[in-house]
Amino acid sequence: MTEYYELGRIEECLPTACTNETKEMNLQSSIALAKAKNATLKTKTQFTDSNPAITRGGLDWLIFNKREDLLLAQAIAYFGSKVLVHEDNLNRYILEGGARKIGGLQNIA
């Protein structure tokens, strides 16, 4: 068996079955997977999966209650009725204190 590297993955093929076409297809699928993981806009589920400190409920609350602020900060966008999250901008919004007061604790100093 021979091994070859593709974007950090090791693929194994039998020498007779490992054609250039197979290698090219594996490379294309690896590139597509890498691009999907680094996508600028993500669904809420994709965002919470890649940011485990933020719960889905917390994100939903933030979007519902701070929608206009998030739109102005370009932290969220709409694709039809679907809310998409711009990961870098939402993280920046949170780091700048935009989510400091959330939930029922808004009036507590």
Image (cartoon, rainbow, N blue to C red):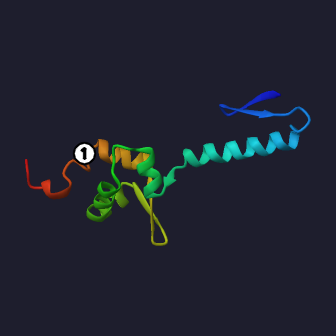
Furthest residue in direction right, as rendered: 16
Viewer-proximal residue among 63 and 52: 52
| Residue 31 in the figure: left or right of residue 85 | right
Please name the residue shown 74% across and 41% down the image: 27
Q: Determine which quarter of the picture holds residue 11.
A: top right
Against 85, residue 4 (above or below) is above
Q: Residues within 10 Å of mark 1 (few under 14, many from 20)?
A: few
Against 17, residue 79 (above or below) is below
Where does the image place residue 72, in percent across and percent down from the top left?
A: 35, 59
Where does the image place residue 96, in percent across and percent down from the top left?
A: 28, 43
| Residue 40 in the figure: left or right of residue 101 | right
Viewer-proximal residue among 9 and 15: 15
Please name the residue shown 13% across and 54% down the image: 105
Where does the image place residue 76, in percent across and percent down from the top left?
A: 41, 58
Viewer-proximal residue among 106 and 49: 49
Which quarter of the image is occupied by the N terminus? Answer: top right
Please name the residue shown 86% across and 37% down the image: 18
Where does the image place residue 49, in percent across and percent down from the top left?
A: 44, 48
Counting the numbered discs, the total is 1
The residue where tag 1 is placed is: 97
Please name the residue shown 14% across and 58% down the image: 104
Q: Which amino acid does label 1 sit on?
A: Gly
Against 35, residue 71 (above or below) is below
| Residue 80 in the figure: left or right of residue 30 | left
- Which SS class for mark 1? loop
| Residue 107 in the figure: left or right of residue 80 | left
